[in-house]
Amino acid sequence: MGDVIVILFMAMLLYGGVRLAFVSPSIIKGPRISLDPSALPWYTLFSVGRMLGAYILSLLFTLTYGRVAAYNRRAESILMPLLDVLQSVPILSFLPIVLLGLSAILPQRIATESAAVVLIFTSQAWNMTFGWYQSLTTIPKELREASAIFRLNTWLRFKRLELPFGMIGLIWNSVMSWAGGWFFLMASEIFTVGSKDFRLPGLGAYLQEAANQGDFRAIAFGLTALIVTIMALDQFVWRPLLAWSDRFKVEMVESDRPPTSWFYDLVHTSRLFLWIRSAFASLGEQFDHWAIRHAPVKSNLEDESPKRNWRRSAFSVCIAGLLLYVGYRAMVMLISVPQSQWRHIGIGVLATFLRVGVSLVIALAWTIPVGVAIGTNRHVASVLQPIVQVTAAVPATAIFPIILLFFINVTGGLNIAAVFLMLMGTQWYLLFNVIAGASAIPQDLKYTSALLQLSRWGTWRTLILPALFPFIITGAITASGGAWNASIVAEFVHFGGQTFFATGIGALISQATAKGDYSLLLASTLSMILTVVLVNRLFWRRLYKIAEKKYRME
């Protein structure tokens, strides 16, 4: 029932966006993009500001949504299928609908900025939410019992138990979210639809304008600014946070090779930092006392739900009526799709499903050993971590023409190239989750496996793989969702003045978007959504339950 409601809800959003798109302004003028290198600092600030705004929204969404889904079984039956759908919706194909719809009700600049933030948000939120949900559902039983014995209320349970336990995974997923967000940032800053120019001043627009003018000097300046920004974030934000988060490992023995950061070592012993920490600690204690007085202690948070009242019933009736009406309107559009196109949709779903499976297997084959090496060896991490972050942040579509040039004359070349693009866009979700899982393995368990003189395979079988299992499942779910999304640009390509497309649901969605065939667009997208929901329900959710019951760190 939850899946049906979710699909009707998505159909309502898509139908509403299509209707708004028809009444948007016919001509929209974009900004003038300067290629002067002196403009790069401002463009960099604009781009980072959009990323930061989207990340703050993603973090608030993650902490709220994941917690409700983890502790309220009734809400989970709706929220988790909805999350499965949202993380697989091909948002790139609906960027025109989002932009045109917002342009119909908001001023142009506000609409364009809002659409950019929403697009980046969709690339950042889902893997963070899955990781947070996985952390909450795998908290060891003894820690839950301890929180109940100490009678922690909702706020103190969140502050003292849930957030510390999920901190390592949350930070690594944040790193991945920023890396993946750069691709969507570039896409949102360079978007145009016919006479409607939705470009935004930023690094993406700068690089596109430089490419259009063939200014290789400006391209070099833009890429340098992007790489420097990514490396600065690594040194001044992510490495300090990872060094700080090592204290939240669930272990009895301190690690002999904890992660380090020169900036963290410099800052956390400074007088200014100590003064700020003292001030925040005082404010935190006051807030804790306020929360203890005003928030009641609840013995069992799970499956809590307030009694339904007449307001909730009226609201539910209104929502049900709206969903039924939109479902009817969407059904009218779907009936107009010819039977021959439905046959193409079925074949396309199967073809894309096979490509997603192949890309996921390849990603698992290399991300698990490399992720374990980075997560458990400080020297390897100091070398590979910056390389991985920079590589993950480089938009995959920038490399795709080179891959396509190599495979275009090979039999089935576009199919191979499509798998490569899916792999480049999704393997990082797996890698960063594996790194987070390997980093969280307690040092005392490592010492125990060494004392037992386990072989290398024995250590992997009894310690590493069981500890990684929840993180692998989380990464695989987000990676597979990202692969379905990447099929939009992987299966339908403009290259060298020609259009190439492979059989797949992504190619059908791209063709429907280019032609403005909204009936085919709705049918193809809902077919993709239904497929992803079925796969998640029948396969990934069962593995999630196994991880929750069998592979807790307890």
Image (cartoon, rainbow, N blue to C red):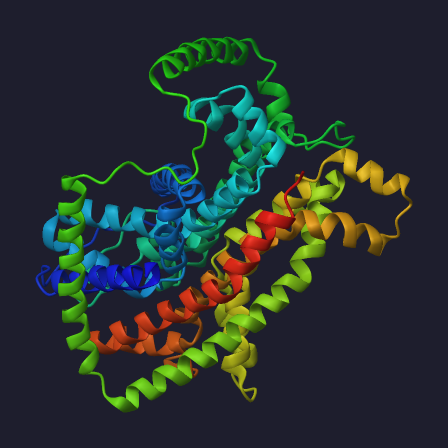
Tell me: 551 left or right of 6: right
Q: Position of residue 251 (x, y in %)?
A: 71, 31
Decide which of 167, 420 is in the foreground and name it.
167
Q: Position of residue 137 (x, y in %)?
A: 52, 43
Decide which of 362, 205 is in the foreground and name it.
362
Tell me: 48 left or right of 251: left
Residue 88 vertical placement versus 44 (above, below) = below
Tell me: 74 left or right of 313: right
For image coordinates 68% across by 61% down, the residue present is 366
Q: Quadrant of the N terminus?
A: bottom left
Decide which of 217, 412 is in the foreground and name it.
412
Q: Position of residue 104 (x, y in %)?
A: 11, 55
Decide which of 430, 539 is in the foreground and name it.
539
Residue 184: name its quadrant: bottom left
Residue 205 vertical placement versus 522 (above, below) = above
Residue 548 vertical placement versus 405 (above, below) = above
